[in-house]
Image (spheres, rainbow, N blue to C red):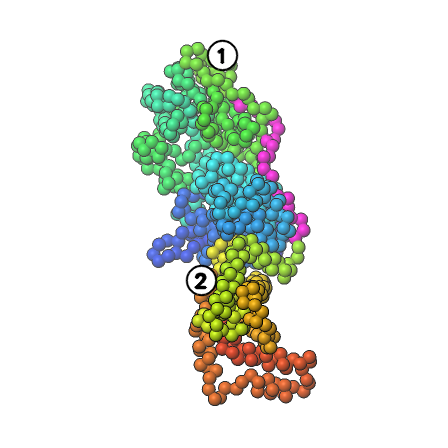
Amino acid sequence: MQRALWCPKNPIWRAILHRVIQAIGLTSIARKEQPPAVDNVSFEAHAGRVTALLGAPGAGKTTALRLMLELQRGRGITYFRGRPLHRIPHPAHEVGVLLGDVPGHPARSVRGHLRMLCAASGVPARRADEVLEAVGLVSLRDERLGTLSRGMDRRLGLACALLPDPHTLVLDDPARGLAVGERRWLYDMLREHAAQGGTVLCSTADPKEATRFADHVVTLDGGRVVADQRAADFARTRLRPRVVVRSPHAARLSVLLAQRARSAQRSVEVVREGGNRLCVYGSTCAEVGETAFRNGIVVHQLADEVGDMGPGAGTGAEASAASGAQLPPAAIDVHSGQDAEPEVAAAEPEPEVAATADSGAEPGFPPSAPEAGAEASPSTSAPEAGAEPEASVSASDSDPEREPSTPAPAPESAPAPESAPAASPPPESPQEASGDGTFQAAPPHRPTTPRPTTVTLPPPVLVRPAPTPLRPVRYELRRAAGVATGYIVGACVLAVSALAAVVLARIGHTPQPRLLAAWPVELPLPPAALGAGLLGALAFGDEFRHPALAVDRGTVPRRLGLLTAKLFVASLTALALAVLTVGCTAEVLYLVYGSELVALPEDWPALTAGWLALVTGCAWAGVLAAGVFRSTTAGLAAVVAVPLLVVPAVHKLSEGPSTRGPAPFAGRLRDGLPLRWPFGGEQHLEALLRLLAQPVGGAMALSVLALLCAYAFTGLRSRVR
């Protein structure tokens, strides 16, 4: 009966699976004698919540995410609402991914990149403008990807992840290197996505940021899960409360606090974090403020805050402290470089939440926040001019009863900042001084209205068009037309062909067909065929160099529809290039030498068919070779190798008395059929066979067939893996 209850076909079990991401036994492949980067990692990320994957650099966060997304080989499985990623028909519609920078061509515009992804995802092209407006990049839609700053690149990456309207967002340390404002905007977007029922999984190396934006924190250390708890429990059990002080006399205040702690026989640690900012561990706002007031020290900020794991938390010790490991007795102060004394039990009990009793805040009511969206703490004076206010975690962020992904309430009106207290006269405001003269911070205003949301997500995609064969064709057309590489190659081919035709006509001794094609005898291929091969190689080479489609699949997809679209677009480009080359050279020759060099040959249909087949074959060879060898250079090398290596081999095989020509074969085929070919089809077949019997035609056909078989083999091998 228990097995029937937990059967995947049970509706209760399926309802649970459809609202959760389950990572089960994720284990990476160990290299040589080193332990695996991720070893048996299992956790869950629920819908409507922001889950943080916390760990120091090298803890295995990125490897775990890549294993979840099947971007890296390993053991274990991840269920996205009850299905692994390889069983989802369109992964981009389920999971939006942001791993590092945007993998796009640096010469492509922001709007062009998004429209290209719209065609690949099967969403309308207007979706690109909707997500650009949501992430605030409307004014930069014509900018190139290579010119974007780091903050704008992160916004574009989030826009790419939100483009197909996915249910789940998976991001790998998206706030790394961002400014405070950009980081706050990014976290607001993630929380808004979770508030609308989505699932957000985001990795970070900063425990304080994890408590600010996440509802659930999963801590990794050494590739293993060492803690899996709610953000409120993480802040209460893993992080230490501290008092943040800003004063122009920070050095003197730190000495006075240390003297008072020694006289009272208490353990108080004072860490100077550069400039005029102090972090005091083991004390309260009331005690620090009273010390400053009694000694006439001006204080610009005084606030309770949930800090890090203490002065001894560094790059390596941070993960161990987050996992509950005990710090060494003599920890190193990462801010001042001095040895910190081991912490002992304080005489007064430490508060369980960020806000202390002296601050006047009650659980569930955060301190007031300014209109700009920055978190502010109760202070005794206005912030210092030119100094950026520090973000702090309020009591609402650490409240265990807080519902996930619920916008934090905001005050009706922010209190006006007060002036700094003077050194001699005591403050007269009852909010600054109590009846016994003890210096206290002003109590925060209790909010009664919810905080207005400063970010908006793009509207949902209500109707998704059915998959059609034109979807990859639209993608390939936008990919090829989005950068100027194809136009530059085409212009160079036309210019070189016209110049070569003029030089060959000047020298003489060149047949008219080769003169119109600008094909010297010394070159293995004409410029138009080389240009078509280069454009074909770029069709797949750019996919591997700038893998815009490989984010949710691990590599460039080797699907039949994408290959067919690339071959079709490459064929159209090659045919246009061949026709333009002949027309351009004929026009130049007519202008320079007159009409005697541009007369129409008698066998022009066969010559035209051979010319178009040669250019198209070079384009196909470039596409297939670049897809097999994953390089544009390899694709172009395969095109050049056809006349240099394959043609001599085919020429040697075609020589000899036993060789039968195409005409007898065509005659036997015509005589063996009971019915006559309609519309003179035997003549067209004979012309085709004569074309294939030529060394270049036969070599090109064999090369394309061999590359097609190699492409199919590599595609099957990648699916087996």
Q: Residue at x 59, y 44 (%)?
A: 131
- In the image, taking residue 67 as reference, residue 14 lies left or right, namely right
- In the image, taking residue 426 as reference, residue 369 lies left or right, namely right
Mark positioned earlier in the residue sequence (1 or 2): 1
Furthest residue toward top: 425
Does residue 218 appear in the picture of this structure? no
* Residue 120 spot, x, y in % from top left: 59, 55
Q: Residue at x 66, y 57 (%)?
A: 466
Identify the residue position indicated by label 1 in the image: 428
SS at mark 2 in the image: helix
**Prevailing secondary structure of the magenta residues:** loop
* Disc nearest the viewer among 1 and 2: 2
Q: How many marks?
A: 2
SS at mark 1 in the image: loop
* Residue 112 spot, x, y in % from top left: 57, 50
The amino acid type, in three-letter code, at marker 1 is Glu
Query: Which of the two residues, 5 or 237, is positioned nearer the viewer here?
Result: 237
Badge 2: residue crowd in 10 Å (few <14, some 14–19, many ≥20) = some
Q: Residue at x 44, y 10 (%)?
A: 425
Which region of the structure is painted magenta? 443-464
* Residue 274 spot, x, y in % from top left: 37, 29
Identify the residue position indicated by label 2 in the image: 633
Q: Quadrant of residue 122?
A: bottom right
Q: Residue at x 45, y 12 (%)?
A: 426
